[in-house]
Amino acid sequence: MSSTSPTDVARKLRRSGWKSAHPSDTASSSAQQSQTPTVISARAGDHLAIHKFLLDVFHGPSNSEFTAQLENPLYEPSDRLMVKHRKQIIGHVKLQHQQMHFGRQLIPMSNVSELATAPEYRQRAIGAALLQAAEQQIIQEGSFLGTLETNIPEFYRQHGWTVSRNHSFSTAAARNILSYVSADRLQHQQKSFGSPFATTPKKYNIRLWRHVEQEALVRLFHENTVDSYGPFKRSEDYWRWLFSRRGFERIYVAIDGPDKLQLNGSLKSIISYAVIRHGRIMEIMTSRGHEQAAQQLVERVCTDILEQEERPIRIDAPPGHPLHEFLQSAGGQYHHLENHNGIFAMMKLFDPLKFLEQLRDEINQRAQQVDLARPFELGLEIRGNWYQILFTPRSVKLVKGKSGRSHLRCDEPVLTQLLLGHLDVQQAVEQGILQASTRIALETAATIFPQLPLWQPPLDNSPA
C-alpha cells in the first residue's frame, strides 16, 4: 500500500473542492466551519482524542481493540479523517485499504467504518463531508471498490452506495446437531453390519490449534479462497496481527492421521480448521476431499458448547457451502439476506465501467462456457452514454458505440450490483431496474453477470 502523508491528502482534498487543514490549523472561524466542514487527516498524536470521541459516540471500541487497530500492519494514521471545531473532534471516519479476492483477480478495495458526528453537531453535513473526503482518498489509493456495513442504508444510497452482499450463515441447536450426527452414525453402522464392502466414514483427530501450526491455517485459507469472491488477501504480517488481536476464543483443527507435529514443518496432516467465538464458527476452511472433517469439527464445537450452556450455534460460510445443508438436515436454518438485525453490507464501485473493463477475461470465460455465438455486440446505456460489449472470436472488448438491437439499460448502482454478482438478471428485469431490449440481450446478461457467492469471513472484523 502506498504511504500518504497528511499534507498529500490535504492537497488532494483541496483540489476536489474540500477545505483541508492540519489539526493545528485553527484560523478558520466557527461560522465558516458551520457552513463548510473542514476535513483533515489524523496524525498519531490524535489517537487518544479519537478514541475518546468514539467512546462518546459508539461506546466503543475497547482499549484493547483500539490498540489492535493501531497495530494492524495495513494501518496508517492518515487513514482516519476528522472534522474539528477548534480543538474538539466533532466528526470522524476510518478507512482500511486491502485487496479482495474476486475470482482469479485481486481487487484493490477500501473499507469505510466508524463514520460518526458528535450529536450536538448533526444536521450540518459533516457526515456527507467526511464520506466524500473518504471517497476521494479511496480513489487516490487506487481502490476500485468501497465497502461498509451500516444500519442507515438510506444515507449511503444518497451518495451512490448500494447493497451488494448478503449475510450468509446457518444456525441450529447444538443438541439437535449432536442427535443428528449420532443417528447418522448409527445408520452407517447398521448398513455396514454384515457387509464386507461397506465404507465407514473416516474419523479425524480433533483438537485445539497450537501457535506453531500457523502455517497450516495460512495454507488452508489460501486453498479455499484463491478463486473465491469476497475474502481479503492476508499477508504473513496480517496473519500474525489477526492471531495477536485475538478476536476469537479458540481455534480447532482436524488432523488426518495421528496427532503428531510434522518434523518437516509442512503440517500437511492438518486438513481443516474452525475459528470460534461465543458459539459462532466465524471461519471454517477444509481441504478438498475431507468434507467430513468439517462436520466433525462442528460436532466437537457443539460438544464443548453444551458443557458450558445450552445455546444454538452459528456457522458463517459462503452461499453453497456444504455445512449449510448439514445444519438444515439437523433441523437448522440457512439465512441468506440483505438485512440482518438492521445491518446492511453496502458497496460502491467508483468507476463501474473501468471495473467492467477489468473483468473482460472473466466475462469471456463465462461466454465460452455456454458457447455464446460470436461475433456478438451487446449494447449498454449508462448515464445517457452508450457502450458496447464486443464478443470477438477470441476475446471481449468494451468500446463506446451505438445501442444496437440487443442492449441493456440501467443506472450505476444496478450495474454495480450486476458486476458484483448480487442481482438475479431475470428478477432485475421483472422489477424494472434493468431493461433488456431483446431475449438475446436478457440471456446474454444472465450469462455474463451471474449471481456470485460474494462473502467475507467475519474474522477480519472481529474485535479484540
Image (cartoon, rainbow, N blue to C red):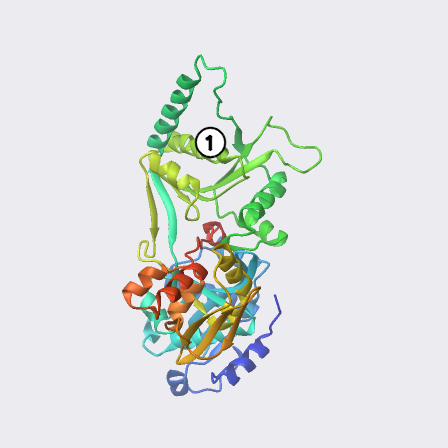
Q: Secondary structure at mark 1?
A: helix
Residue farthest left in this picture = 431
Residue situated in front as seen by the camera: 294 or 19: 294
Quadrant in the rendering for residue 112: bottom left
As drawn, is 212 to the left or to the right of 224? right
According to the image, label 1 marks what residue?
296
Image position, residue 404 (x, y; %): 42, 76
Foreground residue among 361 and 107: 361
Closest to the observer, 80 or 450: 450
312 on left or right of 464: left
Q: What residue lies at 57% left-to-right and 43% top-to-bottom?
A: 220
Vertical side of 455 occupied by 85: above or below: below
Residue 230 in sight: no
Looking at the rendered structure, the number of numbered marks drawn on it comes to 1
Q: Position of residue 463 (x, y in %)?
A: 46, 52
Tell me the residue at 42%/22% (across/down): 188
Q: Quadrant of the N terminus?
A: bottom right
Residue 77 in view of the camera: yes
- Residue with the most extreme right position: 264
Q: Residues within 10 Å of mark 1 (few under 14, many from 20)?
A: some
In the rendered image, residue 226, in percent from the top left (x then y), is placed at 56, 51
Give the residue drawn at x 62%, y 69%. Answer: 2
Residue shown at the point (36%, 32%) measured from the top left? 177
Position of 96 compared to 189: left or right? right
- Kind of residue sitting beneath label 1: Gln
Percent from the top left, x then y, of residue 159? Answer: 38, 74
Is 417 above or below relative to 36? Answer: above
